Amino acid sequence: MNIVFDLDGTLIDSAPDIHAAGLNALTAEGLPPVTAEQTRSFIGNGSSVFIARLEVATTGQSLPERHARMLARFLKVYETTHDQTRPYPGVPETLEALRVAGWQLGLCTNKPIAPARAVLAHLGWGNVFASVIGGDSLAVIKPDPAPLRAVIAALGAGPVVYVGDSEVDAATAQAASVPFALFKLGYRKTPVSAIPHARAFDNFLDLPDIAARLAREMC
């Protein structure tokens, strides 16, 4: 049995550190700050889109040269900015319970691979996931299904469940024809009822049972 997770807004609340790294990029360009709430709404479609949204929010447009400078600065800072990042309650226990129950764990995130691996190491999760695909691991990012399919291929045969928190994750799961479990406390922008999902949950300790039921339904 295989279970694949999104990272930001699903396993971890990283918005405070993403906000800090974003403010650093804005300050370097002499641009005004954005709020933490704005930052949360910009997360989900990869770092390049995140920076473009920062530009548009503060200047009304995204300019190629400025965007390149801001993105490079953001990625450099982001790789070492994780002091305020925390797992959601119950996540460490759930990952261990799934592993003990025989699940293969994978990670499919639009966060670039270097900061993704850095935060995994910071949290002591460097060896938890059998396969990790980041936002720059392939030529495309979610909601294209290729990153999720790459993780699944690396994990091997068996039922697959994908766990995420957003519209992007739901669209990825649909495109890959994989059942989707929606974590309701992440960074989604629309109501739960508007996001296609097989199950929705707000307590990670419920996930092992949810995943097991979804796996049985696939058999």
Image (cartoon, rainbow, N blue to C red):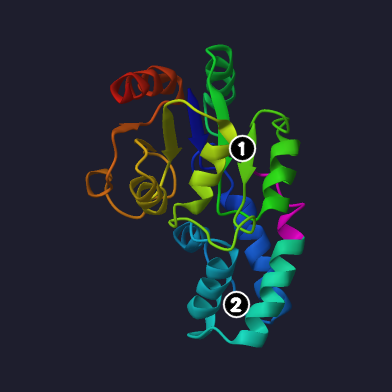
* Main secondary-structure element of the magenta-colored stretch: loop
Furthest residue in direction left, as rendered = 193
In the rendered structure, find residue 125 and report the number of the disc placed on it. none
SS for callout 2: loop
| The residue stretch that appears in magenta | 77-86
In percent of the image, x 66 and y 44: which residue is there?
84
* Residue topped by disc 1: 86
Q: Is residue 40 magenta?
A: no
Q: How far is mark 1 from mark 2, CA to CA?
A: 27 Å
Query: Residue 154 sits in which quadrant?
Result: top right
Residue, disc 2 = 32
Instruction: Say if 112 sits above or below 198 in the image.
Output: below
- Which residue sits at x=42%, y=23%? 207
Quadrant of the image occupied by residue 65: bottom right
Is 104 rendered above or below residue 66? above
Magenta segment: does it hold 84? Answer: yes
The single residue placed furthest to the front in the displayed view is 157
Q: Is residue 145 above or below residue 55?
A: above
The amino acid beneath tag 2 is Pro
Q: Give the residue at x 59% y 18%.
A: 96
Specify the quadrant that holds the C terminus. Answer: top left
Residue at image point 22% right, 44% down: 193
10 Å neighbourhood of mark 2: few (<14), some, or many (≥20)? few
Which x, y percent locates residue 166? 40, 49
Does residue 11 appear to the left or right of 201 in the view shown?
right
